[in-house]
Amino acid sequence: MAGNFWQCSHYLEWLLDRQDVLRYRASDLKILGSEEEYQKIMIFFADVIQAFGKSLEVRQQVIATATVYFRRFYGRTSLKSIDPWLMAPSCLFLASKVEEFGVLQPKSLIASCCKVVNNQYSKYFKDYSYPYRTHDIFECEFILMEAMDCSLIVFHPYRPLLQFCEDLRPQLLNMADELLERSWGFVNDSLRTDLCLHYPPYLIALGCIQLALISLSRNPPANSSGSSNDHHSFYFSSQQSNINPLVIAEQWFGELNVDPEKVMTHLSLLFLVFASIVSRASTKADLPPNCHEC
């Protein structure tokens, strides 16, 4: 992995203008009817990659990288070019190498795909059995690398997220762990959107922290400090009750060593995209019936 995000291919080649992505996506939108329907398909296959990865017991970072590869490929290519059912495991196969997880055994990969499709998706796609074999994965992997011009480096928001949460720990005290857990979940959910195509990882991390702080202010964690007889627990519980996550957020975001106007513009866009796409609760049953034939 390259050590500097600002000098790597992720920043130089794979932060795409939204209008360019929509132009590549135009033929698919004509068939599907709207951007919303397109995003339902992309969310669905993000879940498919997650299911394949879980079946293979790979690390979350491998799954995240595979999901970004999937977004990159279809960010510049029509869904009609390669069946997403083939591209999804091919992205996992390539990501396992790039993230140094170890090369997945092709036969095990195909067996897991068949098992997941039969167990989890057969009720949505009746009479559909997974048709691809190992040679298809190998061929698709080369197509994927060619489409990405062998720019395989992916920086994820997880590392800056950890750094930001540690920076906030002194102000949040025991809420810091809850902030990290909720922010981490939002980062995972951000993979179900186009955010990785348009924004650097640190901005995605900041947006997810903002959402987590709002979540903490509205739904604070239950008091788990321990027995009420413990004077240390009582002390920290008293401090915890005086914490206002939104006040801390306002102060902390104001002290960031970045252009405040740029940060707030990106954060507002992140919030709108996240709210309009992820929270739309796109169930698999809502998918167009011919999404695997698009």
Image (spheres, rainbow, N blue to C red):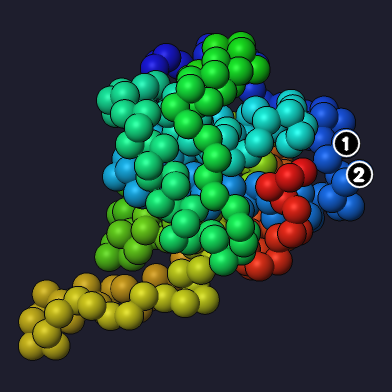
* Residue 201 in the image, given as x and y percentages of width and height: 53, 35
Task: Please tell me whether mark 1 sits on a helix, a strand or a loop.
Answer: helix
Q: Does residue 172 appear in this view?
A: no
Going 19% across and 76% down the picture, which residue do you hit?
A: 225
Q: Residue furthest bottom?
A: 229
Q: Residue furthest front?
A: 127
* Residue 271 in the image, given as x and y percentages of width and height: 66, 55
* Residue 186 in the image, given as x and y percentages of width and height: 50, 55
Q: Nearer the viewer, residue 144 or 273?
A: 144
Q: Is residue 100 left or right of residue 186?
A: left
Vertical order, 231 against 172 (above or below): below
| Mark 2–mark 1 CB contact (< 8 Å) | yes
* Residue 277 in the image, given as x and y percentages of width and height: 69, 57
Task: Please tell me whether mark 2 sits on a helix, a strand or a loop.
Answer: helix
Going 33% across and 36% down the picture, which residue do you hit?
A: 108
User: Callout 2 environment at 10 Å: few (<14), some (14 to 19), or many (20+)?
Assistant: few
Quadrant for residue 74, please give it.
Answer: top right
Going 73% across and 36% down the picture, which residue do you hit?
A: 79
Going 65% across and 17% down the picture, which residue do you hit?
A: 147
Q: Which residue is mark 2?
A: 30
Vertical order, 225 against 20 (above or below): below
Q: Nearer the viewer, residue 151 or 207?
A: 151
Q: Which residue is mark 1?
A: 27
How far separated are the C-alphas under marks 2 and 1? 5 Å
Amino acid at dot 1: Ser
The quarter of the image holding the C terminus is top right
User: Callout 1 environment at 10 Å: few (<14), some (14 to 19), or many (20+)?
Assistant: some
Residue 6, label in figure: none
Q: Does residue 219 appear in this view?
A: yes
Numbered-mark total: 2
Amino acid at dot 2: Lys
